Image (spheres, rainbow, N blue to C red):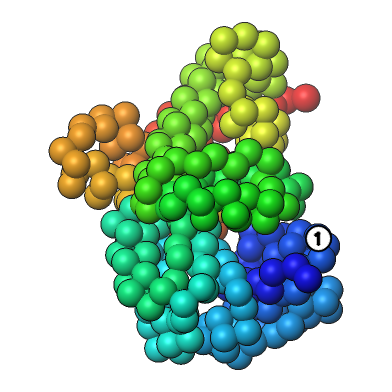
Amino acid sequence: MKQKIGFIGLGIMGHHMASHLLEAGYPLFVYDINPAAVKELVQKGATACSNCRELTAKSELVISMVPDSPDVEKVALGKEGILEAAREGLIYADMSTITPATAVHVAEELGKMGVSCVDAPVSGGETGARNASLSIMVGGPRELFDALLPIFQVMGKTVTYCGKNGAGQTVKACNQIQVALNLVGMAEAFVLGSKAGVDPAIILQVLSGGYAQTRVMDARGPKVIKGEFEPGFKSRFHYKDLNIIMDTAKKLNVPLPGTAIAHELFAALMATGRGELDHSAVINIIEDLAGVEARTKS
């Protein structure tokens, strides 16, 4: 019989990830603070739990996909959390994006109770979660990575072992640097061209065929020039990630000048009430500053 899995956090990405596990035949126990999200998974065959402790008691592997470091600490170490039902042999895989320090702390605390932990943040947004094509970055014991690989492969296409606990989160931070800078670079290119009177659809076509091409441009470029910012990954979550990056860089004494600019642009996005939009909406700030909308005329 397949491993009993508990899944905590059924949001914009988590509900797709949990659904893939159900479709793969894993017995699934679910919990979320949103009852509607739980109901949707129950209708697909999952079993609802009233809190993280109950879910943990019924599971052999617990997976969490929640917004931020404090949420992970609450899920893992808080009241009615994983720790209260922790036992020898339990496995915990946190797939949220949090600080590397939090990932290490949670692994150490749960490890005292015999729980084996990995941090396994993901990249790919809602599209990647829906299509089971996520990139998954894993930190923790190598033998645990090997054991969990078939489960991760149900949810993702590229699963990479990054090193000890916390290493997955470090690599995710690096990923978010690159994505943020790609988004800002695309925004500036579209706005400059539009200000000069060139249709951004032409700019997108040309840039997509040369050395400037990126996956960010392929996925979000056509939507951006139409002014479509329905979230695949919300701006406020990328801003949270940039806060993690800047905090980590400060602790490691690593200068990140480009990321610092991206961080301030996303801060402006938050200040103007656009945090629920897709992270590609950072172009709105460049447009505001330039006094132009980079929208296709076709």
| Residue bearing mark 1 | 24
- Give the crowd class for mark 1: few <14, some 14-19, many >=20 residues within 10 Å: few
What residue is shown at x 47% (from left), y 48% (from top)?
142
- Could you say where residue 132 lies in the image, as x and y percent from the top left? 73, 48
What residue is shown at x 52% (from left), y 55% (from top)?
144
- Could you say where residue 121 lies in the image, as x and y percent from the top left? 50, 52
- Could you say where residue 22 lies in the image, as x and y percent from the top left? 78, 67
Along the line of sight, which residue is nearer the eye, 266 or 10?
10
The quadrant in which the N terminus is found is bottom right
- Could you say where residue 276 lies in the image, as x and y percent from the top left? 54, 58
Along the line of sight, which residue is nearer the eye, 90 or 27?
90
Q: Is residue 66 above or below residue 86?
A: above
The answer to whether one can see residue 257 in this image is yes
Q: Secondary structure at mark 1?
A: loop
The answer to whether one can see residue 97 in this image is no
Along the line of sight, which residue is nearer the eye, 22 or 131?
22
What residue is shown at x 60% (from left), y 55% (from top)?
148
